[in-house]
Image: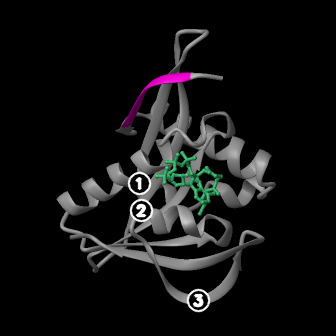
Amino acid sequence: MAFTQPLVSQAVDAQDIQSCYDVRIRVFVHEQKIPLELEIDEYDPVCLHWLATAVEVSQQSRQALGTVRLYPVPNSSIGKLGRLAVDLSARGLGLGRKLVEALEQDAKAKSMTSIEAHAQVAKRLFYEKLGYHVMDETVFIEDGVEHVKMGKLLG
Ligand SMILES: CC(C)(COP(=O)(O)OP(=O)(O)OC[C@H]1O[C@@H](n2cnc3c(N)ncnc32)[C@H](O)[C@@H]1OP(=O)(O)O)[C@@H](O)C(=O)NCCC(=O)NCCS
């Protein structure tokens, strides 16, 4: 599939938030086999969500293709990045980077000073390319997948 006109914006209405959940279900539940009951959790209602879309060239229709969420840790200046997902058909086009950049820009505007993430070990290089570093080399299992804690100071 070919895509053009990528766009990342904050999901504000119920329809956009549902599109974010739908991407996560396709990627984490169907592709990565994470149980559905673990996917949408108690943090979702208090998180900010971003939605990445692009126009699929042959159909000339805009499709929801990626998402990420930000959890503002209470009584701190830390934001937690989570549930970053881009549909298999749209990977390698820069949508993952655009989603993280949009989240960081908003976190900065909200005076957050750092972003932390539980990163899948297999995605460590992706986060390193975006300026994240491993905060602790201890590998832990979350939702059945190996993770490490990564972080980035917002300059
Ligand atoms: C990880 C993920 C979000 C990356 O999204 P993407 O849109 O394909 O990434 P981008 O195209 O923005 O890539 C940005 C850079 O990271 C690199 N990159 C992307 N995925 C990578 C990976 N799995 N391993 C190493 N590098 C990767 C790209 O080559 C690119 O490098 P460049 O700037 O030197 O060209 C996507 O692969 C995905 O949704 N995977 C399944 C869900 C998942 O595992 N989420 C992360 C949970 S922690």
Kind of residue at disc 3? Glu
| Residue that mark 1 sits on | 100
Q: Is residue 66 above or below residue 125?
A: above
Element at label 1: helix
Q: Position of residue 87 (x, y in %)?
A: 64, 39
Is mark 1 in CB contact (under 8 Å) with mark 2?
yes
Residue at disc 2, CB closer than 8 Å to ligand 1 = yes
> Which residue is at a point 58% across and 49% down the rendered structure image?
85
Q: Residue furthest top?
A: 59
State which tag comes first along the sequence, 2 or 3: 2
The quarter holding residue 105 reads: bottom left
Which label's residue is closer to the chain start, 1 or 2? 1
Q: What residue do we see at 69% from left, 46% from top?
A: 27
Q: Secondary structure at mark 3?
A: strand
- Taking the image as shown, residue 33 lies to the left or right of residue 50, namely right
Q: Is residue 31 left or right of residue 47?
A: right
SS assignment at label 2: loop
Circle 2/circle 3 CB separation < 8 Å: no
Q: Residue at x 67, y 85 (%)?
A: 139
> On the rendered structure, is 141 left or right of 154?
right
Q: Which residue is identified by label 2?
A: 130
Nearest-to-viewer mark from 1 and 2:
2
Residue identifier under label 3: 137
Tell me which corner region of the image, top left, top right, bottom left or bottom right, holds residue 74: bottom left
Q: Where are the magenta residues, as a range? A: 3-8
The kind of residue tagged 2 is Leu
Task: Provide residue 69's location: percent of width, then percent of height.
Answer: 46, 55
Q: Is residue 8 above or below residue 40?
A: above
